[in-house]
Image: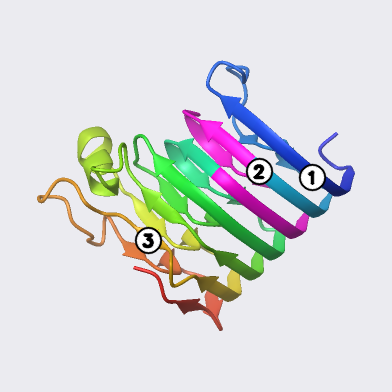
Amino acid sequence: GSSGVLTNFNLDIRIEQGMIGTTSKYTGSIAGINSGLIENINIKTNIVNIVDGVGGVVGKNNGSIKNINIEGFVEGADLVGTVVAMNETSGALSKISSNTLLRINSIHDEVGGIAAHNKGLIDQVEYIGKIDGITPANGLYRAAHEYASNGTTSVGGIVGLNTGTVSNTVFDKDSIIDVRGESTIAPTSSYPVAGIVAKNTGIVSKSYSAGK
């Protein structure tokens, strides 16, 4: 079940649209929802064309995820992160490194290099990778214009929307958030972009953005 313990293994996995049941709200390489402990795992993932609620490790986290190295490719639409889509109030992410390409195929919700939406605790994590849009030639704001020009989008190098606590995080110097695309769509209060947290009503401390 989602409240178990998973520790000490390596995982190489591919997930694509059609492999997941239509009733699945959250998708992840290890679990859709975690309420237990996930620890000491190396993950190579390739998640392709999932609609929403996509996390490279788990979709929604209510438990603890720590000492994780993840690399590969994560593609989704709304509420997408390379570690988790949603980190709930009881959720904790710590000592995690993500070297992952995050690609958005449509967008009107939160996107984050680590988590799309954080309500809990994120501590000692780093993102080393690239966040981009539909194709390498069209950045996130092309996606925003085509699919959600009337919506609200937030893209963060670590977290899209933070209502919890983010501390001791790094958006690495080699990391990129690609906002190329429609010239009429640019980062605004409705489309904020930031190296650490795009929208924040929580706590952010001791965090460093060196990417672009």
Colouring rule applied to residues: rainbow
Q: Which residue is mark 1?
A: 10
**What x and y, as percent, mark residue 28?**
65, 37
**Depicted 155 relative to depicted 210: above or below:** above
Q: Quadrant of the N terminus?
A: top right
Q: Which residue is mark 3?
A: 176
**Depicted 108 relative to depicted 7: above or below:** above
**What x and y, as percent, mark residue 15?**
60, 28
Give the Cα distance between marks 3 and 1.
Answer: 27 Å
**Depicted 64 relative to depicted 143: above or below:** below
Tag 3: Cα neighbours inside 10 Å, few (<14), some, or many (≥20)? many
As drawn, the residue found furthest toward the bottom would be 206
Q: Earlier in the sequence, mark 1 or mark 2?
A: 1
Residue lying at 39% horizontally and 70% vertically, measured from the top left: 211
What's under tag 3, amino acid-wise?
Answer: Ile
Give the Cα distance between marks 3 and 2.
Answer: 20 Å
Magenta stretch, residue numbers: 45-72
What's under tag 2, amino acid-wise?
Answer: Lys
**What x and y, as percent, mark residue 201?**
47, 69
Residue lying at 64% horizontally and 66% vertically, measured from the top left: 122
Horizontally, is 5 left or right of 30 in the view?
right
